[in-house]
Image (spheres, rainbow, N blue to C red):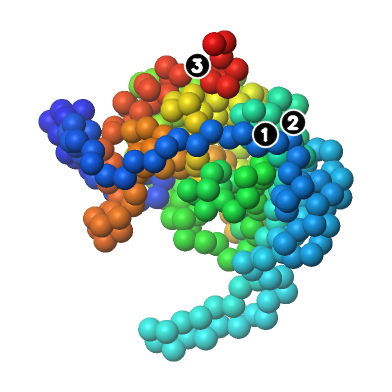
Amino acid sequence: MDPTQNPHRRYSALTGDWILVSPHRTQRPWQGKQELASRDSRPRYDPKCYLCPGNERAGGAKNPVYISTYVFTNDFAAMMPNGRSSVVETGLLRTHSVSGTCRVICFSPRHDWTLPAMPLDAIRGVVEVWANQTEELGRNYRWVQVFENKGDIMGCSNPHPHGQVWASDFLPNEPTKEDQQQLAHLREQGSLLLIDYLQLELEKEVRIVVQNQHWVALLPYWATWPYEILLLPRRPVSRFPDLQEFERISLAEILKRLLTRYDNLFDVSFPYSMGWHGAPYGAGEFGHWQLHAHFYPPLLRSASVKKFMVGYEMLSEAQRDLTPEQAAKTLREQSEIHFSERQP
């Protein structure tokens, strides 16, 4: 069986899910939807933007004239703090109350920037906010989810560079899977699942996209999205606040290099959803956890051809055409000079 030509399934050691890989389908003609690639041409400041410094937000509050990062509680939060603890269980119909909070993180006062366009010291400031928010909210909540939705096709309602952090008193579905898989691996092998996996990838080298002294970004063997990335620290780290100063500086550097490659792939501001997974908080042992970030971009063949999770993917299991090895090679070959900075 040639995995570059024949359909096969791959197992995700991190979640326990399976993914159908169909590499032969990359040869089929595309007659689906085509869209023009959008090029960002935003001003440094937009007086109509809800997130720009000094502007009034949709909820009526006014932003301060911030000069670096800025964090505030979401005016339309999905969860509220101090929820009443209640459980309604009636057989097949069950309801649990939730308590949580949702915050917005403005990465920069510059309306026209994205993370790869920001200077390293500004990205470093974002990294520090991610760590501080995780540490603060982890004192009161079981799960802290730092994430960014980039691009309107990922549901981003505002182009100003920003991310979010949601904290909840429960452990959501995806981290629950990762918790179970990592714990089982530690009990069976006596070692961390993602550290063992990283060593395998470093030996094979075929799925690594970019790396530095402290971090490795790779296409996971079990990737679902075409150019999905798993970003890992080289040493065991359970949670974001546990990162040392040198690792945070190194993280800013590898983020800029990785996200520049994304943008250069199709000469467009590359859309994605990304988020950090680290050990939960509260009672329990979480030494089986390894900090990591997921990047899930939807683009497949060009800036106008997207990967949609429909039909079989929604009803059976995730499926991909382009193999992770092919996608990693394509990303590795991209320049680290942003396409907007190229000489004519």
Helix, strand or loop under label 3: loop
Q: For the residues labelled 2 and 1, say whether their Cβ atoms are less than 8 Å apart.
A: yes
Within 10 Å of disc 2 (Cα), the crowding (few <14, some 14-19, many 20+) is some
Helix, strand or loop under label 2: helix
Within 10 Å of disc 3 (Cα), the crowding (few <14, some 14-19, many 20+) is some
Q: For the residues labelled 3 and 2, say whether their Cβ atoms are less than 8 Å apart.
A: no
Above/below status of 135 relative to 87: above
Residue 217: percent from left, percent from top: 50, 29
Left or right: 78 in relation to 46:
left
Quarter of the image that includes the N terminus: top left
Q: Amino acid at mark 3?
A: Ser
Left or right: 260 in relation to 117:
left
Nearer-the-camera pick, 180 or 314: 314
Residue at (54%, 40%) from the top-left corner?
Answer: 293
Q: Is residue 205 visible?
A: yes
Distance of label 2 from label 1 (alpha carbons): 11 Å
Residue 159: percent from left, percent from top: 62, 45
Residue at (30%, 55%) from the top-left corner?
Answer: 310
Residue at (83%, 57%) from the top-left corner?
Answer: 62
Residue that numbered label 3 is attached to: 335
Distance of label 3 from label 1 (alpha carbons): 19 Å
Disc with the residue nearer the chain's start (3 vs 1): 1
Residue 189: percent from left, percent from top: 41, 40
Q: In this rendering, which labeled residue sits more in front, label 2 or label 1?
A: 1
Residue that numbered label 2 is attached to: 122
Q: In this rendering, which labeled residue sits more in front, label 3 or label 1?
A: 1
Distance of label 3 from label 2 (alpha carbons): 21 Å
Q: Amino acid at mark 1?
A: Trp
Disc with the residue nearer the chain's start (2 vs 1): 1
Helix, strand or loop under label 1: loop
Residue that numbered label 1 is attached to: 113
